Structures are given as structure tokens and as C-alpha cells.
Amino acid sequence: MIRYFSSNFSHLILLIGIFIMIIPVWLIFASSTHTALIINTQGLQFFLGDKFLENYTKVLLYEGGFFKEITALKMFLNSFLMATGVAFLSVISSLMTAYVLVYFRVKYATLLFWIIFITILVPLELRIFPTYSVMSTLNLVNSYWGLIIPISASAIATLFFRQFYKTIPDELLESAKLDGANTWRFFIDFLVPLSKTMIVAMFIFMFVFGYNQYLWPILVTSSEQYWTVVMGLKMMSGSIVNKFAFVIMSMIPPVLIIIVLQKYFIKGIFQDK
Amino acid sequence: MSFLELNKVTKIYPNGTKAVHETSMNVENGEFMVFVGPSGCGKSTLLRMIAGLEDITEGYINLDGILINKVDPSERDVAMVFQNYALYPHMNVYNNLAYGLKNRGISKEDIEKKVNEAAKLLQISEYLQRKPSMLSGGQRQRVAMGRAIVRNPKIFLFDEPLSNLDAKLRIQMRLEIKKLQQKVGVTSIFVTHDQVEAMTLADRLAVINNGLIEQLGTPIEIYNNPKSMFVAGFIGSPQMNFLEGELKNKTLTSEGFEINNVTSDFNGPVILGIRPEHMSQTDKGLINLSVDLVEQLGSDNLIYGEIKNKKDFCFRCPGSQIIKKGSKLSLNINDNNYYVFDKSNGNRVN
């Protein structure tokens, strides 16, 4: 009885939490399906209007910016490329860094790791000038690589992989050695499949991180060609409903990636433990 | 030349700990050698040096006529079964067995044939598609053995592979390992701290203490003729009784009794060792035991009691004999089956 009550109670709290988070989103979504006139005169709308298709197609194909070089569709492509690039590169680099730190006979590996780790205290915003100057020397300003590379080294992901590798018993490595696995094979045949779950989790995490970048893309791109969705949120001109529609659409990719990959994520957790 | 030769092999860890002292031994082809000793005695280190998982500080190891000191573990052609099995958790049983073969560039058909043969031998054919997490302890043990067998290595190395199993399964697997080794005929080295395992499995066993081989021989040799107090105490269950005493002119005085005509010229303080199973009850025996505790094992009774200053003296008698707590027993040593050790260094003197 008590259990029944307490589980219901916790469900109630969860439901309240969901409502608090969902309601503003729903308000924006419902409002984005009306005409600008209704929003301007009657405020935000709780119920759906009939301008959904009209507003959203307009936004997707609307040519924004000063030079009219960019559409929302292109922004989505840019954001997707940037977020995927950041996620891929940071997962791969963290996997490998952690591998070296844990399994190679590196002198002062722990010290090195902590040096890597304290870069968390130095976010991109703090080192933005030197980073920009490096990118401009490398001629990477106004390019996808310029957007991606500077934020593709993740100390947090390195921490996660390192801690995970440390829990893998040494016998596994020794046994693999006796079975003729070299350094590279052990990484590919053992560590990568064993950290599958964590790779997916880190991929989601870094994808959303890359997608949400705002300051860096603004600085490193001057051409409208490279505008990302989050930049577009600020730069977008047009009527209020179009902005709402854009806000709603901007949420779709991160939500989608979580929904799609969550399946593997949970599968990994329940099968391989 | 022996199949496996260890010559003055020494291991010193970077922090200065000497784990193995100049150890030399030979293992013949097809022999089942057991390293037995208390934990931390260096037996696992020795095994790992043979496997190539630890560097050899000094000395050399020859396997099948080849010096293997600097040979990479993967090229030594040795297979090892680990204490926690170290199965590859993300691969199914088939791939666990096949992995080492794949790395050797063996063709798919041959791999399949070999894996199936090994699986049949170990009766794990029906689990080939399962992951290790879906197997029981005994099945995992078999897979670990299969992984070793399938490669047909020069030598099997077992690092306490039975210690994670429950008592009943351990005895069963012990039997299976021995049978399998006899069938396959591969030279094997088995490390354990369990003296029963050591006695039952070994063709020859090496009792190791503090990084030194205390004694090397067949189980029965070592049981009947321990060279030191350590070996005497370690081999045999229940443990040998040790009594303090004095040996003078071939007469040993200890805890209220005397033994004459001891075959030793040693004079001075000694330790007298008597195995619990080497005594029997008589009317007027040497040793007077007042019984404190009786452990009835069914086939045997273990009687614990006091003789003069020595507590927990153990005597083993058939289970049919009924002995009550508090009673007094008079015991004789059968056929002069006693051992005398120098008290200062533990060496056998009779």
C-alpha cells in the first residue's frame, strides 16, 4: 500500500515536472500555427491554428541574412555537419586519448590526465582570441573545419572513457595478448565494442554540445553560408510566427538524435552487463 | 634437454621487491606440473614470466629448445587460463574460441573445424552462440579451457582457475582438467594455493615459499618425505602437528615423552612433526591426549586435544570409532612415521 502510494506520488512529481517543461514549448508550437496578426493582438495561443504548413514552408525556404545567401534549410545542414563533426571527432579523440593514458606506459599518465582535465576550467570563451588566431593562421576561418575542430577535444568524454577503461580487468588485456592481439587490435576488437554504450552516450552529449554552439560560429564565420541554426535564431528576421516556427524546428535535430540513439543506448545497457 | 627449462629465473619488481629468487627447474613434455604455495609466494609471478606477461629480471627460460626471454607473449605459443577466466564479454563463445585463431591467420573453415572439435571435447557445443554472461561458472570455466585447447599450444598455463567455483564444482572441474590433460597430452603448469588440488592434479609439484622452490617432486614423495617444516606443514590435510623438543644423542625429548634411536646425528632444539593420520590408539602409548573437540566427517573423525603444553593436537581415526569429548587417549606413532626438523632453520634432520 505504502509502495503503491509512494510510486504514485513520485509519478505525480514527474508528471508535474514534465508539464512545467512541456508547456512553454507547446505554447510556442501552438502559436506558430497561427497568423502573426492573432499573436500580436491576442497573445500566445494554447490551441492549434490552421497556418502550420504555410508558416513552416515559408521559414524553411526563406532567404535570410543581409545578402540573402542562406535559407533555414541550409542552416540545418550546417548545424548538422557541425554537430556530427564535433561528436565524431571528440568521441574518437577521447577514446584514443583514454586508451593511451590507461594502457600505454606513459610516464606521469595521471598528471597528464589531470592537465587535460583542467581544460574544463578554460572554456572556449576564455581562449577565444588565441583559438581564432590559430584558425586564421591555418586558413580555416569560414570553413566547416574551422567550426568543428576547436571544440572537438572533450576532457569530459576523456574522463568517462578513462574511468571505464580502468574498470576493465587486466586479465582481458593479457588474455588478448596471448591470443595474438596487438595494440591496434586490442583497441578495435575489445575497447571499442566494450565501450559501445558509452560511445553512444558521449556521441549524443557531444552532438547536442556542438549543435548548441553560438559564440564560436559567430566569430569564425563571416560568410552567411556557414550560419548555423542557433545563430539563425538570433539573426532571423521576419514575423513573429516565423520565428516561433524556426524555434520549434531548431529543437528537432537534437531531440531526434536522442530518440534514435536511445534505442541502442538502452539495448547496450541491458545486454552487455 | 627438457621441454621447458627455467634457469636461475629471478624477478625483481621496480620497487625493489624480489618476488622470485633464482629459480631453476625442468618440465618434461606432457608433464602436469603444479606450483603450490601460500598467496604472495611468487608462484603466479613465475607462471606469468613463462607466459611473457612479466619481464624476466635475470636468468633465462627455454621452451621447446627456444630461448623465450624476449619473445612476445603472442609468439610464445602458450595458452593461459586465468582465475577470473578473462572471457571476452562482448563475443559469443564461438568467437571467444576463434579469436586467437583468427589472429593467426587461419582459414575460416579450419577455425570452424577446430572450434567445433574443442567444443565437443569440452561439451560446450550447445552454448557456442551464447555470450559469457549467459553461462554458469562451470560453463565459463570450460570456455576458458576451450580457448586454450583450440590453439593447440606448446604449453597450458593455469592461474588458480578453480578458485572462483563452489566446492562441489571445483572437485568436478579438477577431475575434468586432469582427464583432459591426459587426453590432450599437452604440457601443463597449474598454479594453486590449495594443497588438495595440487596433490590430485600434479605429476610433479613444486612447493614454493617466499619466491623459492622449497621442494620439487611427485605428490607422494613430498607427502612422505618433506624436506622442510614449511613443506611438511603445507602438504597434508589436516595439517601436521608440530611439537617442540630437544634431540640429544639420538634421543628426542618432547612434551612428556621420549623417542629413542632417532636416525639423526643432530643435537639441539628441534621440532617434531607427526601427521594426524600416522598415529593409532594403544593401551600404553607415547602420547597422552585429552580430547577437547571431535569433528565427525563420517568416514573419519578428527580429534583435537591437549598434550602437556601443546594445544590443538590433531589425531585422525576411522569414523566408526566413537570418542567422547573429555576422554583421554593413548597414542602411538605408526612405523616411526615422524619428522624431525632443525628448530633454527626448519630443515629436516632425520
Image (tube, rainbow, N blue to C red):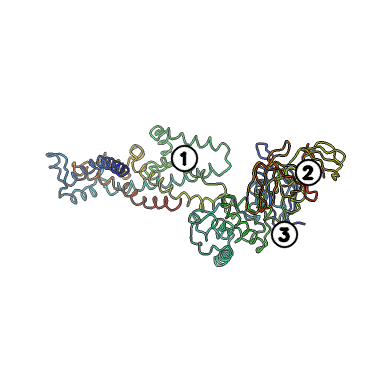
Question: Circle 2 is placed at which residue position?
Answer: B286
Q: Nearer the viewer, mark 3 or mark 1?
A: 3
Tag 1, which secondary structure?
helix
Which chain's residue wears label 1?
Answer: A
Dividing the image into 4 quarters, which one contains the N terminus of chain B? bottom right
Q: Residue at x 68, y 36 (%)?
A: B16
Question: Nearest the camera: A205 or B156?
Answer: B156
Discs 2 and 1 lie in a common subunit: no
State the separation of the CA atoms marked 2 and 1: 70 Å
Asked if badges 3 and 1 are on one and the same chain, I answer: no
Which quadrant holds residue B65? bottom right
**Earlier along the polypeptide chain: callout 3 or callout 2?**
3
Q: Amino acid at mark 1?
A: Leu
**Label 2 chain ID:** B
For residue A217, above or below residue B169: above
The label shown at residue B29 is 3
